[in-house]
Amino acid sequence: MWLSLVVLLGLYYLLRWYRERQVVSHLQDKYVFITGCDSGFGNLLARQLDMQGMRVLAACLTEEGAKQLRDRTSERLETVTLDVTNTESIAAATQWVKEHVGERGLWGLVNNAGIVLPTAPNEWLTKQDFVRVLEVNLLGMIEVTLSLLPLVRKARGRVVNVASILGRLSLCGGGYCISKYGVEAFSDSLRRDLFYFGVKVAIIEPGFFRTNILPLERFSQTLKNQWNQASSEVRETYGEKFLASYMKTIESLENICSEDLSLVTNCMEHALTACYPRTRYSAGWDAKLFYIPMSYLPTSLVDTIISWNAPKPEKTL
């Protein structure tokens, strides 16, 4: 019995390995639009796909970021400035994409743009702190997707949305985890909507990586600012020791963040170029072996694990 089970599992993974190695033909004729290409995952993916010969349309927040990217890539790659929180900017970028892809349509849309800060215990934050993150990570992503969807549907292409393991486990306060849970939900519903049109939707769930989205010095400074803006009652309840302990937790991220961004961009590339892309990609060993498995545990057990070494407020029960 056990031998039969091992053989079946072996055959399953062999078939899966074979299917996932099948690559879409004529990649050199396909256009891919990527947001958030100033740095980090988007920047590396744009360069990676450009080296593969694909026609990359890279959206950067700043002209400086766009110029630096063009200097490191071939003449095939073209850039546009895009603020995903601005409807007019999205409309202009959509028109720009239409002019480039023509009747071929848009093969790939990669929603990568995102921010983390401000992140702090929820009680230290204001509604506007949450809105700022949600406008970029979720609402902006939705508006970009809806604007470009007719072009993706025309090409029967791919939508690749960058979520996070924090879209599976809410490890911190603020808008970031909320936005990534939203990305997961939107992507799931979008995938089911577009199934009938031959469009595939993939979700990328990275673990902790060292990118400009998480500048630890600015993280610490932002946390101090949130502490200072909190009410005297909140500061008294949490205490200075909690702030110091929370700061140390942030500083410890330096030791666990991976520097190998290709672990993420390789997942993105596979989602765009494979004949049989996955629905979800877990990027990084911390995501694969710890955070994703933990997300399936009972909630009470997850709460215990997360709070075990977490900073404790001064005034607790």
Image (spheres, rainbow, N blue to C red):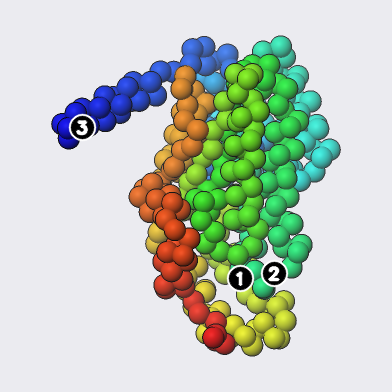
Name which quarter of the figure residue 56 lies in. top right
Give the side of residue 129 with respect to residue 160, left or right. Answer: right
Tell me whether circle 1 and circle 2 mark residues in contact (CB < 8 Å).
yes
Quarter holding the N terminus?
Answer: top left
Give the structural element (helix, strand or loop) at label 3.
Answer: helix
Closer to the chain start, of discs 3 and 1, is: 3
Q: Which residue is under mark 3?
A: 6
For image coordinates 49% across by 76% down, the residue present is: 311
Q: Kindly identify the residue that appears in the image at 74 percent across and 68 percent down.
A: 126
In the picture, measured across the screen, residue 284 lies left or right of residue 101, that is: left
Q: Quadrant of residue 82?
A: top right
Callout 1: 10 Å neighbours few (<14), some, many (20+)? some
- Amino acid type, mark 2: Leu
Residue type, label 1: Pro
User: Compared with residue 182, is residue 43 higher up or lower down, i.e. above or below?
Assistant: above
Q: Secondary structure at mark 2?
A: loop
Q: Which label lies toward us, 3 or 1?
A: 3
Find disc 1 in the rendering and name its residue: 121
Query: Nearest the camera: 112 or 186?
Result: 186
As drawn, the residue found furthest toward the right would be 88
Residue picked out by circle 2: 125
**In terms of depth relative to the viewer, which is nearer, 90 or 307?**
307
Quarter containing the C terminus: bottom right
3 or 2: tag closer to the N-terminus = 3
Decide: few, some or many residues near mark 3? Use Cα within 10 Å; few <14, some 14-19, many ≥20.
Answer: few
Q: CA distance from mark 3 to mark 1?
A: 47 Å
**How far across and how far down the image is residue 275, in percent?**
47, 19
| Coordinates of residue 274 in the picture (x, y in percent) | 46, 22
